[in-house]
Image (cartoon, rainbow, N blue to C red):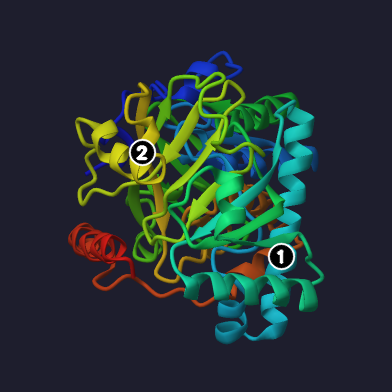
Amino acid sequence: MNLLYANDRRGSYPRSVYADTCQPLPPFPALRGETRADVGIVGAGYTGLSAALHLARRGYRVALIEAHRAGFGASGRNGGQMGSGQRQEVDWLERNLGRAAARRLWDLAEEAKALVRSLAAESGVPLREGVAHACRSAGELDHARRMAEHLAGDYGYDRVEVLERAELARHIGSTAYAGGDLDRGAGHLHPLNLALGLARLAAEAGVAIHETTHVHRLTHAARAGATSILHCDTGRVVCDHVILAANGYLGGLDGRIAARVMPINNYIVATEPLGDRFPHILPTNCAVADTRFVVNYWRLDDDRRLIFGGGETATYRFPKDIAAVVRPHLLSVYPELRDVALTHAWGGTLAITMNRMPCFARPAANCLSASGFSGHGVAMATLAGRLMAEAVAGQAEGFDAMAAVPMRSFPGGAMLRSPLLVAGMAWFGLRDRLGF
């Protein structure tokens, strides 16, 4: 199944609240015929747009190829939350990679947040401060307390406040959780506007962006100094370097990456504007994510719509009634919203890895890839683009630090990803429902 076209119309953003409230860009032209570039990039989400922007500002000729529209994929339809750290917490990183590597990865994640803040400000996209993490049990709350103390004492990060049950309830307006924490160094924003802002900046820097252009095959350079080719449906890009930034839409462009990165779907709804009703819901305007494996996450937008994500399905086709999938999760947190209209419901394809850390790799001598951000991509995908731009320019320290994280293939590789998805989502969905 080609996920590029399985659930969406070509060249059209899904009918999300983001598409209805974004600062739109005119379409960029499709590629026609052959073009030459120093760097050819596949995918115009955060990763590809950030790579293109940073390369162009270094003086490289860049061709950025996107099958749909800039920000069409997960970058333009996610929950809008910019979290701290890596997808795995520092205790996991220390245990599996050692203290020095854990510290380097934490520092890179702090760079990622700073980069998003800088680019959002340059693009005129407001970023709201604060993300709360809602724990389902006393054991999870104890772990959150230990992590806050560890980050403050050993990493110099004192922005996390531990919240007991009543304190968390005051921040989020729900008593559904045992407590949690509030990370005042994290934040949330309009994700599609961030992607479109990056596209504006990239185009202004000289990047040739080609939308509605599908890369269906790659020819890597056979030897040092030779060129690579992006074979597209409407032409081709001849380039010295290739960056793969397609994440969940990589398809069969590289089998080794596909064996390590699994696309999955997630679903989001938006309520009608709440106005002055329900003032207890998110009174401090933080965003929230809970500790389920299939995470519930939510925030208010600037019009006081509640944007709520959650729910899983075991196929790559979006359900016909997405709202019916997400509504029970929303009502488990805010039952008082049962009669509030859901004006938007949409799905999106992201990508995960076995260990939930992003997969940085060199598929060929002149090719770099970063994908599998596992729901932590607002910051890390944006940083990944900059790290790949630096690596093309010969400064690969950051890229190599991320690529050093061991990355196992999924059992059976790319061929068995679909049946593994069915089994895995059923298992973890059951664990969430049982409270594990």
Q: Earlier in the sequence, mark 1 or mark 2?
A: 2
Residue 374 on image: x %, y % = 46, 57
Q: Identify the image quadrant of residue 68.
A: top left
SS label for mark 2:
helix
Q: For the N terminus, give its image quadrant.
A: top left
Residue located at (67% from left, 52% from top): 383
SS label for mark 1:
helix
Q: The disc labelled 2 sits on which kind of residue?
A: Pro
Q: Residue furthest top?
A: 26
Q: Which label lies toward us, 1 or 2?
A: 2
Q: Residue furthest front?
A: 166
Does residue 396 appear anywhere in the picture? no
Does residue 189 appear anywhere in the picture? yes
* Residue 187 tag number: none
Residue toward you, 122 or 293: 293
- The 10 Å Cα crowd at callout 1, few under 14, some 14 to 19, many 20 or more, is some
- Identify residue for label 1: 398
Q: The disc labelled 1 sits on which kind of residue?
A: Gly
Horizontal side of 409 relative to 126 (left or right) equals: left
* Residue 335 tag number: 2
Residue 332 on image: x %, y % = 35, 46
Distance from the alpha carbon under mark 1 to that under mark 2? 45 Å
Q: Identify the image quadrant of residue 197.
A: top right
- The 10 Å Cα crowd at callout 2, few under 14, some 14 to 19, many 20 or more, is few
Q: Where 141 sits versus 134, above or below?
A: below
Q: For the C terminus, give its image quadrant.
A: bottom left
Q: Identify the image quadrant of residue 365.
A: bottom right
Residue toward you, 65 or 225: 65
Residue 74 on image: x %, y % = 46, 40
Q: Where 436 sits versus 66, above or below?
A: below
